[in-house]
Structures are given as structure tokens and as C-alpha cells.
Image (cartoon, coloured by chain):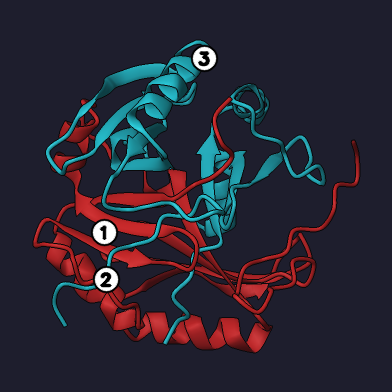
Chain colours: A cyan, B red
Amino acid sequence: MIPQRMTLVTLGVADVAVLRRFYEGLGFRAAGFDSEGVAFFDMNGVVLAVFGREDLAEDANAKLESGSAHARMSLAINLESEAAVDAAMAFAAGHGGRVTQPARKVFWGGYAGYFADPDGFLWEIAYNPFWPLDADGRPQLPPPTRP
Amino acid sequence: MIPQRMTLVTLGVADVAVLRRFYEGLGFRAAGFDSEGVAFFDMNGVVLAVFGREDLAEDANAKLESGSAHARMSLAINLESEAAVDAAMAFAAGHGGRVTQPARKVFWGGYAGYFADPDGFLWEIAYNPFWPLDADGRPQLPPPTRP
């Protein structure tokens, strides 16, 4: 079996420098040991890597396809309240984020919006009353409701 | 500023049931409160969500584009040794994973391979001697080498 863990999320992007500046603009601090070709951000339990898309495709021995499919992926940041979501969405919109879905009450009982980063990757900013955050900002998943 | 954290990685997939079975086949245990439309896996600090790709696009108010771009995204699992990487790659290959890059020594000094899940999303299985794993399996990033 494979250990149930995730340690990195890598975004293959057209211009690493542009994306590094964007994330630093959101207030993220890069790990500081990276290079022009890659930026790492310690995201409190999982690491975000921003890497050239051709480099990523080469490393994975995978073909870059001609189309893009940004809607196939989103990365989420859960916050403590609806007000915190509004503040974060406004901050993102003011720092190069393109809002695709303004924050609103959603069908699952929370409150969330989406913005796209300069490369088109989608970030969801969410308040989920059913997933309380612990002191480290990690969501506490509810217990199973079925075996 | 936006808190520097990532709490979910969502994969928008063609068939949630197929992907749920695949990940459960790797040994991952679903959170147990999910539904036919979405599966959640607590990945030790970050949550993996498997969601319908049309549902994700609708939720994000984003257009699904005709092409796919799986090479734009990879998700990583760091393990404790080269032998553990080999074992995990073999396990994945035997449980529906399509190996795109057999594990090998890589330019950054580690050892890693890639496989694609049934939807085409890429997973990297890696041993990184420069990122020791703590008791919880979380990589300990080295300190900054520049301010």
C-alpha cells in the first residue's frame, strides 16, 4: 500500500517568475532555497511548488497537450469565517487574482469564491462550518458517517 | 494577506466512482462522509477531493476547455528511501496506475518516478534525501539559503 499522504502540489506554469511574484504578493513567503526555475512555498503541511510547465512535463516524461484545462484543478484555502473569505477574495482581486466566482453561500452549506492566478489556476477561498480549523489552521474532518 | 496554507487539492475527473476505487485500491481510506459525487481523502495535513469535472467547473464558474492538460499538474508523495519508492511504484502499477516515468535517480539528487491515475493525473513518488520526513510523514524543508 502507499502511505496516505500528500506532500507537494506542483503547478506547471508558463513563467515561474510571474507566479512567484504573484504568490509573494498574496503574502506567501517562498522557502528561500529555490532557484529561477522553481519556487517552493511551505503551505502548512503541504508544499506548493511552482515549476516551468515544460520542465514538469519533461521530468514526468509526459506530453504537454495543446489545450489547457485549468478548470480541472483547484487549490483551496479554508478560512475561519465568511468575513475572512470576503477579505481574502478582495485581497486576491487587488493583487493580480482574476475572480471567476465571487464568494457566495454554496449548496454544501458553506461560503466560498474562486479566483484564477495569472496562469489560470483556480483557487477557492472557503468558509466551511462543518470543518473546524485547528490551532494550526488545518481542517478537522468530521468523523465517518458510514463504516 | 492570505494565510499561507493549503487545505484541499481537488481533482475534477470524468468518473468519480472509478477514481474512488483507484485511490482506495492504493490503500487510501476515504473520509466516509462523502457521496457518489465526491470522495475525500485525508492526506495527512491536506485533503484530496475527487469531484466531477463538470461539477467543479460549474462550482468555480469556469469553462471546461476542450483539451486536457494533465501534464500541468502533479501530486507528490515523498517516502523514506529509494526502496520505498520502488515498492510504491510497483504497487501503483499493479493497481491501475500507468507508469509514465519509471523511478530513477534525478538531477536534484533524489530518486523518483511518475504514474498517471486512470483519469491521467500525474503522481510523483519520490525519495528526497534533502527533505527528511518527520514522524508524521511531513517533509521538513531545509532552512533558507538566502534571505
Residue A143 image label: 2
Mark 3 Cα within 10 Å, few/some/many (few <14, many 20+)? some
**On screen, residue A31 above or below B100:** above
Q: Chain for mark 3?
A: A
Q: Nearer the viewer, residue A89 or B87?
A: A89
Image point 60% across, 40% down: which residue? A50
Q: Which residue is mark 3?
A: A96
Cα distance in 3D space between marks 1 and 3: 31 Å
Between A139 and B70, the residue placed more toward the observer is A139
Q: Disc 1 or disc 3, which is closer to the eye?
A: 3
Q: Of tags 2 and 1, which is closer to the observer?
A: 2
Q: Which secondary structure lies at badge 1?
A: loop
Residue in view at x 33 percent, y 62 percent: A141
- The relative height of residue A133 versus residue B81 in the rendered view (above or below) is above
Identify the chain of the residue marked 2, using the numbered disc in the image: A
Where does the C terminus of chain A fall, quadrant-wise?
Answer: bottom left
Crowd around label 1: few <14 · some 14–19 · many ≥20 (10 Å) = some
Q: For this rendering, which residue is in front, B125 or A23? A: A23
B92 relative to B16 in the view: left or right: right
| Disc number lying in front (2 or 3) | 2
Picture coordinates of residue B9 (x, y %)?
39, 51
Residue located at (29% from left, 44% from top): A128
Disc 2 to disc 1, C-alpha distance: 28 Å
Residue B34: where, in percent of width, then height?
A: 17, 63
| Residue at 11% in and 56% down | B37
The answer to whether residue A4 shows anywhere in this view is yes
- Residue topped by disc 1: B119
